[in-house]
Image: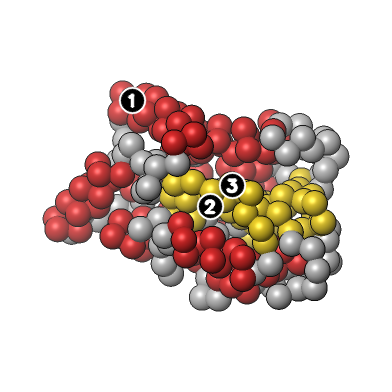
Amino acid sequence: MDASTYAVEAEVEANHWWFVARRQLFADLIARQRLSADARVLDIGTSTGTNLRLLRELGFSNRLGLDLRAEAIGWCAERGWGKVEKGAVCNLPFGDAEFDLVLATDIIEHVDDDLRAITEIRRVLAPGGTAIISVPAFQSLWGLQDEVAHHKRRYLKGELLDLIGRGGLACRESFYINYLLFIPIWAARQIIRVLNIEMASENQVNTPMLNRILTWIFTLDIATAKIIHPPFGVSIVAVTTRVTGPSP
């Protein structure tokens, strides 16, 4: 991401509607795995530490972050979220089968070789372990946030599931999220594009009242998405496990 985008994210992630409800979703998915407090957990692409914040709140003592950017590592260190090492998802600096849980949330869309990223996640995941992966969805939603975050692509769910399978992971569960706000977000991005509005991040488009409303909507969204499996959404979430056998 751009340095200015890191600054905005670090400022808003504690209370911004998207980060708050998203952490609730991941907390629920992680709780279902019934991991011990000393489980080995890796968060790939820590950014400013929203997942590390969650893992600390959930009581995981053996948590580790990874990010390629010094800015991200600095933000996490400043907030005391835990240890963050420097490295890339396509060349993880860890041995085979080191982690019981891997979070790769909104990271594989940043790299040219997303298949390599999946195979690396599979490699460091212990047998029986879980990898939770999320990506942005629908190329038609491409907008300012994709540009400032340096995304390479957005996905359809079928594309993501195919990629996961080719990378040696088995998908236990997958669904679109943020489906209730799909049309408003699409419309807002068209307006930003047409009017050529400049800002460091779409996360700046917020007010306290709007934040409360959107938090309620997105909380309802993630509570229902796992049940009704909507055919569209702004993001895709997949809960995966390592396929036994040799690496792809």
Tell me if mark 2 has few (under 14), some (14-19) or many (20+) residues whose alpha carbon lies within 10 angstroms of its own.
many
Give the number of the mark in front: 3 or 1.
3
Q: Which of the pair 88/6 is nearer the observer? A: 88
Q: Is disc 1 placed on a helix, strand or loop?
A: helix
* Count of numbered labels shown in the rendering: 3
Q: Which of the pair 169/192 is nearer the observer? A: 169
First of labels 1, 2 by sequence position: 2
Left or right, residue 166 beside residue 134 = right
Could you tell me how far apart the alpha carbons at marks 3 and 1 are, in whole angstroms? 28 Å
Q: According to the image, label 3 marks what residue?
A: 173
Could you tell me how far apart the alpha carbons at marks 2 and 3 are, in whole angstroms? 12 Å
Q: Are marks 2 and 3 in contact (CB under 8 Å)?
A: no
| Horizontal and vertical percent position of residue 39 | 83, 43
Left or right, residue 214 beside residue 131 = left
Q: Is residue 166 above or below residue 207?
A: below
Could you tell me how far apart the alpha carbons at marks 1 and 2 are, in whole angstroms? 24 Å
Residue 211 visible from this viewpoint: no
Q: According to the image, label 1 marks what residue?
A: 213
At horizontal 37% and vertical 29% (from top left) the residue drawn is: 217
Q: According to the image, label 2 marks what residue?
A: 134
At horizontal 41% and vertical 67% (from top left) the residue drawn is: 153
Q: Which of the pair 46/139 is nearer the observer? A: 139
